[in-house]
Structures are given as C-alpha cells and as structure tokens.
Amino acid sequence: MDPRPTVFSTAIKKTFARLNEFFFGPDDTCWDLVRIGAAITVLLPLLLLGVSGNYERLYGHWGMLPRNEAVDTIYWPGFLFLMKADPKWIWEIYWATIAATICLGLGLWTRMAAATTFFLYVATVQRNLISFNGEHGIIAFVLVALVFAPAPQRWSVDHLLLRKPLPSKTESWPARFLQFNVCMMYFFTTTGKLLGAWKLGGGEIWYQITLSDWFRFPDVEWFRTPWVCLLAVHGSLLIEGSFPFLVWTRLRFPFVILLIAFHAVIAILFSNGVLFFNIAAIVALCGFLRTTDLRPRNKTIVAEPAGQIIESVRR
Amino acid sequence: MNPPETSNWRNKARKVAIVLIVIGSLLPPLCMNIGAYARQAGLSGPILKLDQPFPSLYALLLCQSWGLFSYISPFNFTIRYQVELNEGQIVRLYDYKKEAAGKWQSILFHNEPKADLNFYSNPRAMRGYMEYLIRTNGLDPASVARRSIYLHYWSVLSREQAAAAGTHYGPETDRVLDSY
C-alpha cells in the first residue's frame, strides 16, 4: 500500500482535528458570569412569586390549576408538585429551589446545584404552563450547560473557600451546546419575524410596538418617527439575523457586546413583562465571552498540548 | 490491546458519544422550528414532517419554538371574567391577589401580560382560571348560571389611520371569548 497521504485523507484528518479542537479544545468561556447570571435570573422572579402570593396562585394545590386537574394535563417534571396532598408541600419545593439557586450563584457544589436548580425550575414551570415565558426556554438550556461546564470555577465557593483546584483539563462542548442553542434562537426568531409581521419597508411594526402596552414610553412621539422605525426594524433584524453566522468569526466579541447592549436597551424601553427575558438572553450571550476578552491585552493564555491552561506575559 | 491503545479507543468512543449527544439534543428543536416555519411560509412536502412533537425534550423545556417578538397583537387588551348568578345578578370577578399588589402589580406580577397571552391561546386554561376566580371571589360554583370571558380591547391605528382620526387608538370594545 502506498503510505503517502492523499488530498482526501489529509482533508478528512484536518476536519477531524478541527472538530476535535472545536468540541474538546480548552474551554475559556466566562462560566462564572453565566452561572451567577443564571442564578439571579432564577432567584429574583422566584422571590417575587413568593412575596406576591403568585407562587401559590400559579402552583398551589388550590391555585388556578388545582392538583386534581393538573394530574391529567401536566408533563412529568411537574408531578413533583403533586406528590404530596399537603398544601405546604409546594413551599418545601420553593425553599429547596431557592437553596439550590443560591448554591449555584455562590458556586457551592456547582454541578449538583445546577442539576437540582434545573430540575426544580423545569418542574415549577411544567406545574402550570400558563406561567411559561421565553426566559424559561433560555434558562433551561443554560442550566443544562452549567451542569456539564468545567467546575469548580474561579469565582466560586468551591474554589475560593473549599480549596478545590481549578480543572487542569477543560473541554468546550458544554459551551458549544449553549452557543448552538443561542444561535438557533436568533436564527429562528429572525425567520419568524420575516415570515410574520416584521415586513421590510417602512418599519410599521415598530410604530405599532411603541403604542402597545408592552412599550414603556407610549407618549414619547419621536420613538415613532419614520427614521427611528426604520432603524429599529432593520437594525434589529440585521443584528439578530447575522449573529448566528458572524459570532463564529473575528467579530465575535464586538457582536456579542452589541447584542448584550441591544437587550439592555429593550429591557429599558419595554415593560417589566420582558425584563427577565432580556436578562436571560444577556446571560446566555455571556456564554460567548471568553476569560481572555476581559483581560489586559499584554496578557495571553497559552494552551499546552495536554490542554492545561497557563498564563504568560508577552514581553 | 495494550493499556495506552485501550485508553485511546475509550477516549475516542467517549468523544464520539458526546458529539452525538450534543448534536442529537439540538436536532429536535432544529427540525421542529424548520418544519413550523416552512408551514408558515406556505411550503409543502416532506419538510413539513419535520414539525413533530418531542415530548421528552419538551417536558424538560429543551425543545422550544423560537420566535421572540415575531408577532405583536395589533390591539391592547385585558381579559375580563364575569358570571351571572342564578338569581340574575351579574358579578365581575377580580383576582384579589393581583389587586392587593396595588401599584406594585407591574413588579410583583411582572409576568401577567405574558400569562394573559398564554390564556388567550388556551381556552381550557382560561376556564380553569374562571373557576379559580369564582372560588376566590367567595361564590358558590353551584350558584353560577353563566360564565362569560370577555376580551376588552382597543385597536392600535396605523400611521395613516391615526393621522386621519387624530388619535393613535381605536375605541374601546368588548368581544366575548367564551360564554358557557
């Protein structure tokens, strides 16, 4: 047999090497940001639900979907709420969710905390799907990614107080899972907008949005001027639509920052109803940020062949 | 096989399994969204079959139909619940937990506008909520002769219509969503 490599075999080898690097190369994702952000996005609405009595209203045995009716309508994670007939049972789940989320935010037993938070969070939403919102879909895949993300993380109780060493070898596939989900979200959102009411043209949809109950400033007329309508519609379609493609290029960092700013602006301009959705989207976008993005330029990270990350200072 | 060789094979098998699981978990939402939007685009053929339910992933909220702000209703609305008692008295029902929040309602019940959208697309849940309101308003369900759910709405006029009418909003109107 001729041992010389053919063009085809070389191409295959290169592809596999790239794929290997893509999924299993060293991971320098800002997991601390994602973890803390996800915990806040779960915790704050949960506290509001508890304080307002809305938790009992939505998920209680005698709430808007009573226990005996829920048995026939909900998906299996929600059965956690139906396990005991005692109405106080839901509060035990509530406090367990809060405890798990605080552990996640602090980075205490991170993986276990992420897995527990994920299950309790999903169980809560499934108990009554009327409470389901866009942010739940985002936080669900973020929490799954956190279950498998490298742990302990730098800014975590596990590392700082319990002295668990940072992982010597990390892999990128949990980050890729999160990133693919985010890309899919923006791609299909743009598709949905283009097939739906977001017609390219004069930006009429933005005009309507500014007069809807969702908009915080319906009395400010200049938000409806033709050039603002054009900018809002075409700009958002361009940013969201090109993100899933351009985020894999050198434009990743500025594009992620642009989209984070975009969601921050939406959170300000729109009612509280979409606040936590935008926070959830920002948290998911943090999954594209690398620890090296936030360091001074003269510091670089060098990955050794074994996958161990060492810092070096460029002279 | 010697130990390094075995270890190498195990490592490769592990990597293949991980890649398959990651991609496999992404395929259902990908297929569902492609199928759903193909249907919406008016396409026909096998592509529509991609829009299949994936209950196991959906139960874990990992199979979402993405379409953030793709649609916005061309009117502002509230949903009103009303009952007619056996003796003919009409009673409008209130959610006292929401009412008790007062000026904090937009913060404490920040997700209610979205819940209303979910109700709007789920008549069965709306009927369930009606029973909850009957209970919490201190009424005996047996004393209720008729339950009515109204959509109280006011249209948002287009730019041209608004210029002609001198206002951005149409008149406030009620529409019966359900009466039983």
Image (cartoon, coloured by chain):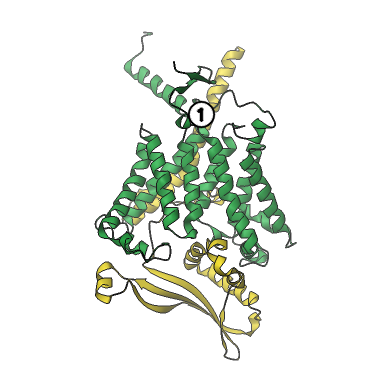
Chain colours: A green, B yellow
Q: Residue at x 43, y 62 (%)?
A: A214
Residue underneath mark 1:
A27
Q: Position of residue A202 (x, y in %)?
A: 25, 58
Q: What amino acid type should be assigned to the residue bearing mark 1?
A: Asp
Kindly tell me whether residue B29 is visible in this rendering. Answer: yes
Circle 1 crowding by C-alpha within 10 Å: few under 14, some 14–19, many from 20? many
Is A289 situated above or below A200?
Answer: above
In terms of depth relative to the viewer, which is nearer, B79 or B161?
Answer: B161
Q: Position of residue A20 (x, y in %)?
A: 46, 25
Instruction: State the residue lying farthest toward the right.
Output: A86
What kind of element bears circle 1?
A: loop
Q: Specify the quadrant that holds the N terminus of chain A.
A: top left
Q: Specify the quadrant that holds the C terminus of chain A.
A: top left
Q: Chain of mark 1?
A: A
For residue B172, what is the image quadrant?
bottom left
In the picture, measured across the screen, residue B53 lies left or right of residue A74, that is left
Q: Residue at x 52, y 44 (%)?
A: A141
Q: Position of residue A74 (x, y in %)?
A: 60, 58
In the picture, measured across the screen, residue A203 lies left or right of residue B11, that is left
Q: Residue at x 43, y 26 (%)?
A: A297
